[in-house]
């Protein structure tokens, strides 16, 4: 039986100490049809990337044994000595392609995810107030890019409804080579739409 949902492990690193403005790095290292397997992977993601708990001033793991204060979907929350923030979360998306997995619940890459990031410049000019959500998961990178290009449009919304709307099709976006759309809403809220592939 095909699983109804996919569980995508999402790792975000926020570094407030880079020149000009804080940097954010988002990786989507693994996708599962089994939530328990996704949680195990999320708990071990930072370790697999070479980090150790002793590196951090705060290193919390959401294992269900205590009250959790770092947000829904967050499995690991870590803070470095220079205020770097690392989070590992699980995003749930519908399994529209009816993808199957191996015995370990993991879907073999490559997968290509449409990731939307909202930056609340209207509330904080530093750009540190932002969050990202996975809009969809695809096996074909061309289809994923087409979906990303249309992610903010439809249901009556047109490009002209944004203060600024830019599309990037050749990897030359100033926001990163994965970004295909940058839009600015009235009031200053920025939206980035990117295609991120499993590693």
Image: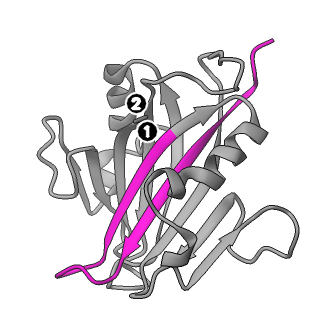
Does 20 sit left or right of 107 as displayed?
left
Q: Residues within 10 Å of mark 2 (few under 14, many from 20)?
A: some
Residue 135, compared with residue 6, is above or below; it is below
- 2 or 1: tag closer to the N-terminus: 1
Q: Residues within 10 Å of mark 1 (few under 14, many from 20)?
A: many
* Residue 150, image quadrant: top left
- Mark 2 → mark 1, Cα distance in angstroms: 7 Å
| Residue 72 percent location from the top left of the image | 72, 63
Mark 2 and mark 1 residues within 8 Å of each other at the beta carbon: yes
Identify the residue at horizontal 32%, vertical 36% (top origin): 149
Q: Quadrant of the N terminus?
A: top right
Which residue is tagged 1?
114
Which residue is tagged 2?
147
Q: Which residues are magenta?
A: 1-29
Does 175 sit left or right of 31 as displayed?
left
Whether residue 22 is in magenta: the answer is yes
Residue 163, compared with residue 146, is above or below; it is below
Between marks 2 and 1 in the image, the one whose residue lies nearer the viewer:
1
Q: How is the image coloured?
A: one colour
Identify the residue at horizontal 41%, vertical 55% (top origin): 26
């Amino acid at each position: 039986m095909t699983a109804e949902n996919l569980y995508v492990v999402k790792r975000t690193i926020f570094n407030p100490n880079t020149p000009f403005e804080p940097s954010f790095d988002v990786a989507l290292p693994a996708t599962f049809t089994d939530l328990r397997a996704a949680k195990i992977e999320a708990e071990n993601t930072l370790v697999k990337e070479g980090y150790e708990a002793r590196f951090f001033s705060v290193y919390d793991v959401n294992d269900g044994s205590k009250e959790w204060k770092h947000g829904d979907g967050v499995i690991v929350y870590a803070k470095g000595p220079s205020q770097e923030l690392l989070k590992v979360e699980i995003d749930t998306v519908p399994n529209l392609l009816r993808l199957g997995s191996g015995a370990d619940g993991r879907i073999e890459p490559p997968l290509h995810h449409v990731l939307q990031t909202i930056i609340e410049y209207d509330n904080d000019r530093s750009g540190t107030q932002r969050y990202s959500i996975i809009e969809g998961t695809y096996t074909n990178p061309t289809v994923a890019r087409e979906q990303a290009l249309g992610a903010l449009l439809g249901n009556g919304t047109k490009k002209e409804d944004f203060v600024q709307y830019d599309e990037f099709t050749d990897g030359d976006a100033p926001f990163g080579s994965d970004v295909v759309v940058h839009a600015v809403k009235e009031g200053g809220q920025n939206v980035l739409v990117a295609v991120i592939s499993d590693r």
